[in-house]
Image (cartoon, rainbow, N blue to C red):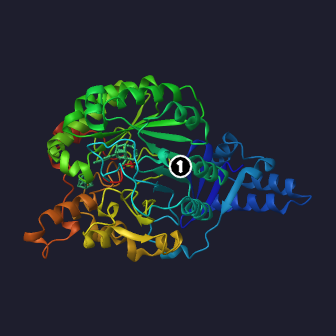
Amino acid sequence: MIKHLIRQEKFGGYWLVRNEGIAIELNHADYQFLSMLGLIYNTNSEDSELRWHVAIEEFTNQKLLSHMHQHGIDDIRSWSSVRHVPSNVALETLPDDVVIAPKRIYFEITRCCNLACQSCFNNSHFKLSNELTIEEILNVNQQAYELGVFEIRYTGGECTTVPGFADIVADARKKGIYISIGTNGVYSDEQIEWLPNCGIDWFVISLDGDRQRNDSIRGKGTFAKVINTLKVFSKYKNIRTRLNMVVAKHNMKSIETVASIAGEYGVSSLNLIPLRPYGRSLKKMTKEMFVQNDFYAFIREVNRLRKLFPEVVFSTTIDLLDPDATTSHDLIVQKKNTCAAGVEACVIGPKGHVYGCSYSPASFPDSADEEGKRIFIAGNIRENDLQTIWHDNSRWSVFRDLGQYKNSKCHSCSHYTVRCSGSCQIMAWNQLKHREAAERSKRNIGDFFDPYCFVDLLDEKDKMSDMSAPCGGAGMDGF
Ligand SMILES: C[S@@+](CC[C@H](N)C(=O)[O-])C[C@H]1O[C@@H](n2cnc3c(N)ncnc32)[C@H](O)[C@@H]1O
Ligand code: SF4
Ligand code: SF4
């Protein structure tokens, strides 16, 4: 059973502690040391144990040694649970921020859904024609395994509605991949029995407010169903839960209710996703979207609630008041200079398209928006393998060429890489597109400012707070 993954990177590598879903960054010396231990273990000769002890004795990074001890891999016998994935490609071909393979794949295995939320950015409810088959899904699992992908987040639509979902999860589990699902938590009695026992490590469940506000968006009775799911899941000590709440003007006042539900049921984190204008939300909810002032008030509210609910980790974007001064509260993606899209993570859509972020025209491969699709879709796993797509920088310019596509104001902003990973390229694209007729020929994505950014409104008191410590910013909010 694989419990640890050591993966090579340009800067050294990563060590994934699978059962905890944590990726620890390794410098070159740390990575070389762990590779050497792997070699000693695999040699399996009479003096392996002795060589192992000498290597440990001579190694000077006490912090790594103590992590190894803490996670039980300081003994040669424990290394049957450690997998090593050295790079098989030229590392220097990737820009600095880009990892050798996605750390996390958001895998939208269907658009079928038992609900039809007003906000849904990808219009889910009915299955699309020609969705990936089970064999194709298992093939993605296999590619992810070979590349050393840390986590697959099955999502959709509602991934739990896919016939054969249990087999998909069991396959990924056997491969040592950390498994999370993005789910609405609205389950039948039968599902609530098997889901917590089928090998899923992390349930990311949607709840959009108190009973009245949630049900007005997600459907009557969904609040009660989610509460029941949380109650049942809280009894399982081996599964981790997160709540995803899509926030806008209509439900800002009920963030506190959701935070207290998180606290009550041992939910470890609450991810607050500002409403993104796509799919059904574009038709039904745009008037609810925050403007700058609302966003500032929202971030203040988040930071008030952080003090009230210290047991819950709050994450959101452009969190300029976060006392932890971090661009990411995620244990796998770091979002250092930009959000995770196309740099640390990717999405695979229900028809095999590979893209950086679901909140983009890439979510609608059958639409007539040819330019949106050209910019935001990097490829299709029915045409190329994932490694080929990931390593071709020309397919990912909008997410990797930050000099061109991030707003220039970010590059000189003191919050950039500290508490904010910069303007969202897709929100900028939306503005460009909406002003198409007047300005298209003269302006580019990078010229547009993130409409949620409130840095210019910060009052003196908030400016005084410590902004100097190191850093998720705008974009890819963890669907
Ligand atoms: C499309 S859903 C798929 C997973 C599952 N069906 C669910 O609802 O959680 C993924 C996430 O996107 C969020 N979401 C839906 N519409 C959104 C929008 N317009 N803007 C931002 N997030 C949205 C959902 O609340 C959910 O947390
Ligand atoms: S947000 Fe999730 S639950 Fe709601 S319709 Fe979309 S996919 Fe279904
Ligand atoms: S200017 Fe850019 S980096 Fe600074 S707060 Fe705004 S979006 Fe973030």
Q: Residue 354: percent from the left, percent from the top?
A: 43, 66
x 20%, y 35%: residue: 250
Figure label count: 1
The front one of 446 and 388 is 388
Q: Circle 1 sits on which residue?
A: 163
- Ligand 1 has an atom within 8 Å of the beta carbon of the residue at disc 1: no
Residue 22 seen anywhere in this rendered image of the structure: no
Q: Residue furthest top?
A: 264
The front one of 114 and 207 is 114
Residue 1 seen anywhere in this rendered image of the structure: yes
Q: Residue 8: percent from the left, percent from the top?
A: 60, 64
x 68%, y 60%: residue: 84
The front one of 443 and 251 is 251
The front one of 422 and 261 is 261
Above-or-below relation of 123 to 302: below
- Side of 197 where 52 appears, left or right: right
Above-or-below relation of 26 to 244: below
Q: Residue furthest right?
A: 46
Q: Mark 1, residues whose alpha carbon is within 10 Å: few (<14), some, or many (≥20)?
A: few
Which type of secondary structure does the marked residue at label 1 adopt?
loop
Q: Residue 142: percent from the left, percent from the top?
A: 61, 62
- Side of 71 where 311 appears, left or right: left
Amino acid carrying label 1: it is Pro
Quarter of the rendering containing residue 131:
bottom left
Q: Residue 235: percent from the left, percent from the top?
A: 56, 25
Quarter of the rendering containing residue 13:
bottom right
- Side of 395 where 7 appears, left or right: right
Above-or-below relation of 205 to 90: above
Above-or-below relation of 401 to 414: below
